[in-house]
Amino acid sequence: MGLDSQPLAGVFVLLVEDDAGNSASLAPFLEYAGALVRAFTPATAPAMIAHVRADAVVVAVADELASATIRTLRAADPGVPVIAVGAPDVASAVRAAGADEIVSRPLNANVLGETIWRVAYGRMPTRRTRPCILVAEDHDDSREMLTMVLRDYEVVLAADGDEAIAQFQRHRPDVVILDVLMPVTDGIEAILAIRRLAPEARIIAVSAGWSTWANSRKDAPDLLTEARQLGADVTLRKPLEPRLVLEAVQGLLAR
């Protein structure tokens, strides 16, 4: 993750094409640009788009019939960015169907990558020069402390579980540090969601507390044990020691 030479490093793309295994597949171009790709056919993509939280949808356009696919995708998720890839002569039809942008063949991986990023995020990609750490913590003092401890890294912040998931999708950080007890969506659910998005994600769970149901059961595991069982790579108990935080981050980055 986070390769500077790849404009789509860590971006999650839902690819729609008739035959993902054919020689003209867009998957190799997207993967070369650094994207995480899941491919579906036009028949299956509309049903999946509501369940797969993609950063962008790329549709391989062979002719104007692809306009129907784009309309169906737009109806299923009006907010997702849609980029069509095909010949210039179908551009007007696919734009009318709802495509945000069209990239013409013959394809250039960098042009495709930068177009996807611009449409999805409204700007050109920034080149990552340092590892990115996502800190998901609902207490201001804890966020400030971790930001200071991690000052040699690029730090992205979130204040609840939902924001943590959204920031993970947006930035694809190299390491995630999250508090297990957070509002809206708690840290356990956030871990599960991040693992579904990226099984290779590196996650540090932190907590000082016990789960509500564990308080009534002496044999019940605490939150950090739950977090470890459900996907955290490392667990740290609060109050956090800066040295241990740095050792955990450095250890995961070295993997």
Image (cartoon, helix red, strand yellow):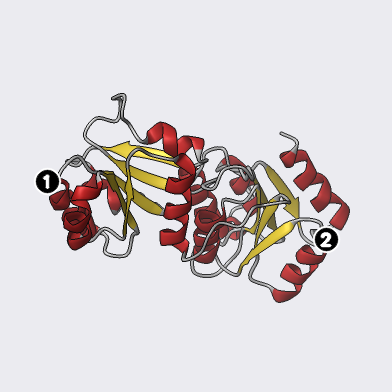
Residue 60's place in the image compared with 56, above or below, is above
Seen as rendered, the residue at the extreme right is 243
Q: Nearer the viewer, residue 130 or 242?
A: 130
| Residue under the image location 57 percent in, 43 percent down | 6
Disc 1 residue type (three-letter): Leu
The C terminus, quarter of image: top right
Q: Is residue 53 visible?
A: no
Q: What is the secondary structure assignment of the residue under circle 1?
A: loop
Q: With 172 as the anchor, is 90 left or right in this view?
A: left
Q: Is residue 156 visible?
A: yes
Estimate how packed mark 1 is, as few (under 14), some (14 to 19) or many (20 or more) residues with alpha carbons within 10 Å: few
Q: Marks 1 and 2: in contact by CB < 8 Å?
A: no
Q: Which mark is residue 65?
A: 1
Q: Nearer the viewer, residue 245 or 147?
A: 147
Q: Position of residue 100 (x, y in %)?
A: 31, 61
| Residue under the image location 62 percent in, 45 percent down | 2
Q: With 27 as the anchor, is 243 left or right in this view?
A: right
Q: What is the secondary structure assignment of the residue under circle 2?
A: helix
Q: With 251 as the anchor, is 66 left or right in this view?
A: left
Q: Earlier in the sequence, mark 2 or mark 1?
A: 1
| Residue under the image location 33 percent in, 60 percent down | 80
Q: Position of residue 32 (x, y in %)?
A: 50, 35
Disc 2 residue type (three-letter): Val
Q: Nearer the viewer, residue 167 or 193?
A: 167
Q: Residue 86's image quarter?
A: top left
Tag nearer the camera, 2 or 1: 1
Q: Nearer the viewer, residue 13 or 202?
A: 13
Q: Residue 71's image quarter?
A: bottom left
- In the picture of the structure, the residue carrying the numbered disc 2 is 149
